Amino acid sequence: MTRAATWLLLAGALLFVGVLASQGVAAVLATLALAKWGLLLVSLFHLLPLVLDAAAIRVLLDATMVHGSWPGALLARWAGETANSVLPAGQIGGPCSWSVI
């Protein structure tokens, strides 16, 4: 992992802890307890299209490169989905095709 990736991971973890603290750890845990196994089922249901899309992206990428590997394809699909969720264009005009590749 590069130095920039390490710092970004640390910044993301600190932001996560900050949001968790601002909302109250007890409130977040109570909400998760209310969801029970439904949250796990929804996550598993969402995992299927994510893996299928990553398999399709893997076919498009060069297999001899590092980014052509299975983890690289899964990371590309996950990053694309994250960008589509964070940017308002995904909710307004549909998924952005540029963020997937």
Image (cartoon, rainbow, N blue to C red):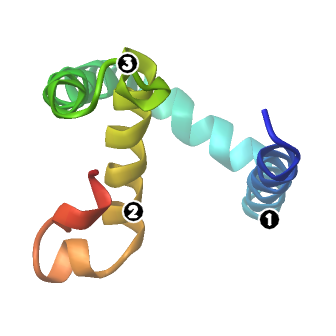
The mark closer to the camera, 3 or 1, is 3
Picture disc at residue 64: 3
Residue 69 or residue 14, whichever sits in front? 69
Q: Is mark 1 on a helix, strand or loop?
A: helix
Mark 3 vs mark 1, CA separation in Å: 45 Å
Q: Image check: 83 left or right of 92?
A: right
* Quadrant of residue 44 within the rendered picture: top left
How far across and down, in percent of the image, does residue 72 sit? 43, 28
Vertically, is 41 above or below 89? above
Mark 2 vs mark 1, CA separation in Å: 24 Å
Vertically, is 64 above or below 94? above
Report the amino acid beneath label 3: Thr
The quadrant of the picture occupied by the N terminus is top right
Picture disc at residue 97: none
Give the residue pinned by disc 1.
22
Vertically, is 52 above or below 97? above
Q: Image check: 84 left or right of 65?
A: left
The mark closer to the camera, 3 or 2, is 3
How far across and down, in percent of the image, does residue 49 sit? 15, 29
Residue 32 or residue 99, whichever sits in front? 99
Q: Is mark 3 on a helix, strand or loop?
A: loop
Picture disc at residue 83: 2
Q: Residue at x 65, y 45 (%)?
A: 28
Dot 3: few (<14), some (14–19), or many (≥20) neighbours within 10 Å?
Answer: few
Sequence-first disc among 2 and 1? 1
Residue 30 or residue 80, whichever sits in front? 80
